[in-house]
């Protein structure tokens, strides 16, 4: 009976030894995939390292934010702030009033160097009797956006009214312009026309 007990203990001890060897080899295999040194972390005991941020030995990729909460990216030790996803949240919003009583093209935002314009929203009221008023928004260069024109909306109509006005509101940013472009409003006019309101935009 004692012999069987001794044999069983020996078998168990042998299996434990094999498991420890396998775990050690597994640890060495995966541990060897960690390259370079930890930027803000370190190995814990003799186990695998826990890395808050690290390097592959040449091109560091560290994610952090600045004091305003914008994402920063560190590449080879140089920290740069990532480009904002929504310009209307990252740049100061400006407004241009609209007061049009004829069929025309009016510049809302003048081009400025190589900056980009984004229309963030608008609130327009239109009055049209017998025939409707319409307006559309576009980007382009020149005083009336006549070069490199990019139309942003269809012709938005007041409909034919007997009294009152048609309010039009849009609060979602439109696509951004090409570098160096401005923004314009293009109108057609019905009878007794008024197209009034405000367009909100950013430029940067």
Image: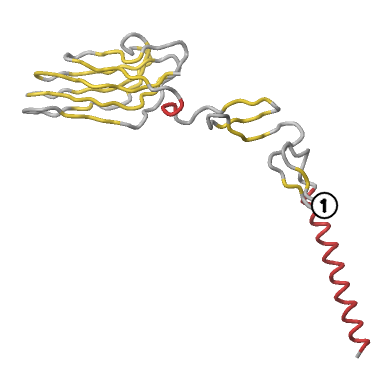
**Residue 168 in the image, given as x and y percentages of width and height:** 22, 29
Give residue 23's quadrant in the image: bottom right
Q: Compare residues 131 and 41 and report the one nearer the observer.
A: 41
The residue pinned by badge 1 equals 46
The count of marks equals: 1
Mark 1, secondary structure of its residue: loop
In the image, is 114 to the left or to the right of 16? left
- State the image coordinates of residue 193 (x, y, percent, origin top left): 13, 18
Q: Residue furthest right?
A: 3
Query: Which residue is drawn at the image coordinates 82% and 66% (left, top)?
Result: 19
Dot 1 surroundings within 10 Å: few (below 14), some, or many (20 or more)? Answer: few
Is residue 150 toward the left or the right of residue 16 in the image?
Answer: left
Quadrant where the image shows the N terminus: bottom right
**Can you say whether 68 is above or below 97 in the image?**
below
Query: Looking at the picture, does residue 14 appear above or below residue 108?
Result: below
Q: Position of residue 150 (x, y in %)?
A: 35, 21
Is residue 115 shown above or below 25? above
Residue 173 location in percent, x, y? 37, 29
Q: Residue furthest front?
A: 67
Tell me the residue at 22%/13% (across/down). 104
Seen at 27% across and 21% down, the residue is: 198
- Of all residues, the one furthest to the top in this rendering is 143
Judged left or right of residue 90, residue 24 is right
Quadrant position of residue 144? top left
Which image quadrant for residue 71? Answer: top right
Residue at image point 27% right, 13% down: 106
- Left or right, residue 68 beside residue 168: right
């Amino acid at each position: 009976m004692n012999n069987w007990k001794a044999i069983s203990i020996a078998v168990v001890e042998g299996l434990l030894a094999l498991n420890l060897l396998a775990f050690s080899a597994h640890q060495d295999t995966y541990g060897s995939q960690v390259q370079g040194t930890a930027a803000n972390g370190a190995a814990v005991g003799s186990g695998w390292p826990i890395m808050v941020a690290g390097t592959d030995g040449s091109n560091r990729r560290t994610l952090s934010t600045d004091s305003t909460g914008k994402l920063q990216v560190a590449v080879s030790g140089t920290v740069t702030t990532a480009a904002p996803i929504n310009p209307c949240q990252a740049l100061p919003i400006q407004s241009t009033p609209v007061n049009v009583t004829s069929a025309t093209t009016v510049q809302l935002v003048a081009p400025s160097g190589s900056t980009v314009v984004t229309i963030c929203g608008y609130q327009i009221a239109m009055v049209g009797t017998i025939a409707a008023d319409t307006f559309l928004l576009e980007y382009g260069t020149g005083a009336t956006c006549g070069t490199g024109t990019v139309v942003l909306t269809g012709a938005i109509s007041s409909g034919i009214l007997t009294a009152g006005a048609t309010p039009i509101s849009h609060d979602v940013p439109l696509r951004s312009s090409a570098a160096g472009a401005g923004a314009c409003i293009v109108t057609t006019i019905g009878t007794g026309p008024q197209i009034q309101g405000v367009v909100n935009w950013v430029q940067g």
